[in-house]
Image: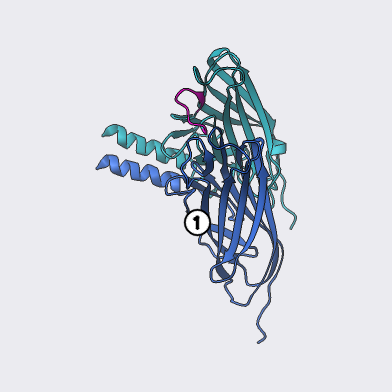
Amino acid sequence: MLTAMAAAVMALSTVVPPAEATDSPPDDRITVTVVTVNGSGCPAGTAAVAPAADNTAFTVTYSDFLAQIGVGAAPTDFRKNCQLSLRVNYPQGFTYGIAQADYRGFAHLAAGAKGTEKANYYFSGSPSTGSTHPFSGPLSDYWQATDRTEVASIVFAPCGEQRILNVNTELRVSAGTSDISKTTSFMAMDSTDGSVKTTFHFAWKRCP
Amino acid sequence: MLSATTAALMALAITFPPGGAPGTTPPPDHITIDVVTVNGSGCPAGTAAVAVSPDNKAFTVTYSDFLAQVGIGALPTDFRKNCQLNLRVNVPQGFTYGIAQADYRGFAHLERGASGTERANYYFQGMSPTAYKSHTYNGPFSDDWQATDTTEVAAIVYSPCGERRNFNINTELRVNAGTSDPTKTTSFMAMDSTDGTIETTYHFAWKPCP
């Protein structure tokens, strides 16, 4: 019982980051917090989230986000995904900024094999936009991909507004002309970093 | 039973060092570090332990399963394992200059012709540029290894008056069979511990403009 409690305390001490609470109302800039992380590439217990102290950025690290084909791979292993649900807080008024996502990992692709990192972005209830970064074998090295977009919002709500942004990241590996009976090709994601930089913010008051 | 309580206290001590929860109290005139997360294929949940010094100027991460291997008994994806540390660097207001150091220690068993590499990638959250340093060992080798990276902190500190971003260290072990025969031998490289220290050489504070 005590052991279980101790384990719970230890678990809490690692889960709750030593920082300010993440639910504080937005001030004059856009902030982002990670609500959920889940997918075939990041089942429970395999992803860790590290928010920045001011909630303008976060890092998600993975211990088992790896897509593979060839020797040792199951037929369904060629595609793995991990979806992040993010709460984006917009301050009241007009806000303009830049949102950026950096994906980093390692790829080992035999000659002729191909790997892809793809991210789909959508706000709950809206259509999605995708961004794809392809890699070709022979390759056995780090890879890094960056997506960047402008963010502009007009919020009339006096306390600002919160929306859920979904980021579905996917790794895919295809054999191409490589021989999968003799080789293994894989692509792994080590980390995903998200950040929002508010370039300017412009608040207004209601006419009396 | 007692050890469980001790473990719980130790875990708490790690999260909230004396002087209050990090990040909630203004930093003193020294740079301090908090380890926020530890995760990767070489350190899945439950296999890494973090010990932070009471003054938050040094930490040690130990691993129970951070091992990359090739050859007999190894899966095709086992030749590369990583572990990423996410650190909150608390920088005092003003200009600070110091030295940050990371020590990596472990054991390697490399057959003749095989090689092993320890590599660390360093980057800030939200920034694309990634710096790295790597250390390679060549077989035949069957002994402890140790690698050290040092960097000036003035280069590490990012935007102290703007966004507060965490610092990431992604460590990696890679083993290459090279000219050795992986059908008859096994070569591996293991990491036992990562130590980080930060030493403030001088600090220089000023007041913000009104």
Residue at (47, 27) in percent of width and height: B74
Magenta-colored stretch includes residue B73: yes
Q: Is any part of residue B132 visible from this angle? A: yes
- Mark 1 — residue? A21
User: How is the protein colored in the picture?
Assistant: by chain
Chain containing the residue with disc 1: A
Q: Residue at x 58, y 20 (%)?
A: B146
Name the residue type under label 1: Ala
Horizontal relation, residue A36 to residue A155: left or right: left
Q: Which residues are magenta?
A: B68-77
In this view of the protein, which residue sits in the foreground, A39 or B31? A39
Q: Quadrant of the C terminus of chain A?
A: bottom right
Instruction: Say which colour chain A has.
Output: blue
Q: Colour of chain B?
A: cyan
Q: Residue at x 51, y 39 (%)?
A: B40
Spot occupied by residue B99 in the image (x, y as percentages of width and height):
67, 30
Count the marks: how many?
Answer: 1
Q: Is residue A147 above or below residue B122?
A: below
Q: Quadrant of the N terminus of chain A?
A: top left
Q: Is residue A134 above or below residue B174?
A: below
